[in-house]
Image (cartoon, rainbow, N blue to C red):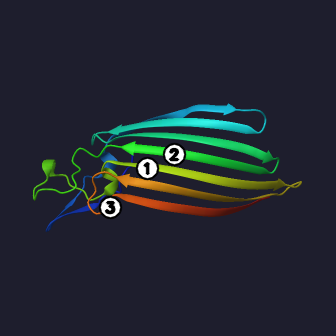
Amino acid sequence: GHRPRPQLFAGLQRVAQVEQDQAERPFGPVAGPLLRQGLGKRVSVGFDYRYYVDSWALWSHTIGGDLRILASPSLLVALEYRGYVQSGAWFYRSAYPLVPLGGFATRDRELSPMLDHRVTAALEWSKRWSRVASGSGVLLGAAIYRYGDFLGLSQVVAAEGSWIGRLEF
């Protein structure tokens, strides 16, 4: 589940209402790696699952899987997938009456029903000399977010890329 930012303002025609402080909202994820299995000396696969539910009746399921290949002693290749689905908060509506149900209202799309899929590919190179280690890596990814009941936005497609450098003494 997503924990929205505290004190998020929500617009209601001419009225603005501050959401309740989420720091006081009980929440509870249940998570853990379900599988990490080596396939020989250089390949491993993993699978994990997470379930989340909170007092706003927001629930979510997250699944993930990855494949890691040690292509050489200094080169790691990683492929990952993450899938996520959630319900909306009990008070979420795409449009509210002037006086919202229970006094709660939000325009936070991450409290609406949503799902996403994300895939990444990464390469990490490392080298160790007697007292110094160095490394470099690149990550490329793509994601699609779908909002089932958010006015004005039904989906977002995103691409990401990053580079890291590392030097250890």
What residue do we see at 76% from left, 55% from top?
125
What residue do we see at 78% from left, 54% from top?
126
Label 1 to label 2, Cα distance in Å? Answer: 8 Å
Place of residue 12 in the rendered image (x, y in percent of width and height, measured from the top left) = 17, 63
- Amino acid type shown at disc 3: Leu
Q: Secondary structure at mark 1?
A: strand
Q: Secondary structure at mark 2?
A: strand
Residue on which the image places disc 2: 82
Residue on which the image places disc 1: 116
Place of residue 23 in the rendered image (x, y in percent of width and height, measured from the top left) = 34, 49
Q: Are marks 1 and 2 in contact (CB under 8 Å)?
A: yes
Q: Is residue 124 left or right of residue 72?
A: left
Viewer-closest of 8 and 60: 60
- Amino acid type shown at disc 2: Arg
Q: Are marks 2 and 3 in contact (CB under 8 Å)?
A: no
- In the displayed image of the protein, which residue is found farthest to the right? 130
Viewer-closest of 116 and 26: 116
User: Which of the two discs, 3 and 1, labels the residue nearer the N terminus?
Assistant: 1
* Category of crowding for the residue at label 1, using alpha-carbon neighbours closer than 10 angstroms: few (below 14), some (14–19), many (at least 20): some
